[in-house]
């Protein structure tokens, strides 16, 4: 709680580029420190003789998204799990793209890392739980894969939707 005579500090989104395989450790640190963060995860299934194990893996390996006040970046930069701390220039666009990815993950549809942001037709999802999201068609085989871009880190997530849920932009 902020004392009554102390103004609230403005917050901005940052991207923590983590050291290899440290995304979950940084997310745990943020949780313990009370910092707002977003680590998009997806399920990965590994089959071993006699058992099947489900893992939660980072959707964007090497990145954790943080909402920080102007006082927070120094302690994040000094964290042993962080290689670099980056600040998106266009905060509004970044927030919108991050929100699209969060909504896709919450829809319980399969979301995976798109290997690259490819050229294609821009579409908007017109119905279903992802209505209103915009993306680029990656592949069409019965079900269409739509790429949700996160331009600041040059990454994208792909989500599968039915073709009749789309309209061209």
Image: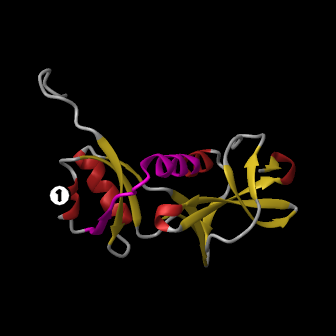
Identify the residue at image location x=69%, y=41%. 132
Identify the residue at image location x=36%, y=76%. 20
Task: Please tell me how many numbered marks the rendered image carries.
Answer: 1
The answer to whether residue 49 is left or right of residue 37 is right
Identify the residue at image location x=69%, y=44%. 130
Q: Quadrant of the N terminus?
A: top left
Which residue in the structure is indicated by mark 1?
Answer: 74
Residue 56, can we see it? Answer: no
Task: Give whichever of 146, 70 is nearer the camera.
Answer: 70
- Render colour scheme: secondary structure
Which quadrant of the figure has residue 22? bottom left
Residue 106 is covered by the magenta coloring: no
Residue 27 placement (x, y as % from top left)? 34, 56
Q: Secondary structure at mark 1?
A: helix
Residue 82 is covered by the magenta coloring: yes
Label 1 environment density (alpha carbons within 10 Å; few <14, some 14–19, many ≥20): few
The answer to whether residue 5 is left or right of residue 120 is left
Residue 147, can we see it? Answer: yes
Task: Give whichever of 10, 36 is nearer the camera.
Answer: 10
Residue 133 placement (x, y as % from top left)? 67, 46
Which quadrant of the figure has residue 4? top left
119 shown above or below 162: below
Residue 19 placement (x, y as % from top left)? 32, 73
Q: Which residues are magenta?
A: 81-100
Residue 81 placement (x, y as % from top left)? 27, 68
Q: Residue furthest top?
A: 4
The answer to whether residue 151 is left or right of residue 118 is left
103 shown above or below 136: above
Identify the residue at image location x=38%, y=73%. 21
71 shown above or below 155: above
């Amino acid at each position: 709680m902020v004392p009554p005579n102390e103004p609230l500090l403005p917050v901005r989104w940052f991207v923590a580029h983590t050291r290899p395989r440290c995304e979950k450790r940084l997310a745990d640190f943020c949780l313990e420190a009370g910092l707002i963060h977003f680590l998009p995860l997806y399920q990965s299934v590994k089959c071993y003789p006699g058992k099947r194990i489900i893992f939660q893996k980072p959707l964007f390996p090497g990145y954790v998204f943080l909402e920080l006040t102007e006082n927070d970046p120094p302690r994040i930069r000094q964290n042993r799990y962080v290689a670099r701390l980056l600040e998106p220039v266009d905060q509004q666009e970044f927030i919108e793209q991050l929100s699209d990815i969060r909504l896709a993950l919450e829809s319980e549809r399969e979301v995976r890392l798109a290997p690259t942001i490819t050229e294609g037709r821009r579409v908007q999802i017109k119905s279903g739980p992802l209505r209103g999201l915009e993306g680029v068609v990656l592949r069409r085989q019965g079900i269409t894969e739509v790429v949700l871009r996160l331009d600041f880190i040059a990454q994208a997530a792909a989500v599968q939707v039915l073709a009749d849920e789309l309209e061209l932009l």
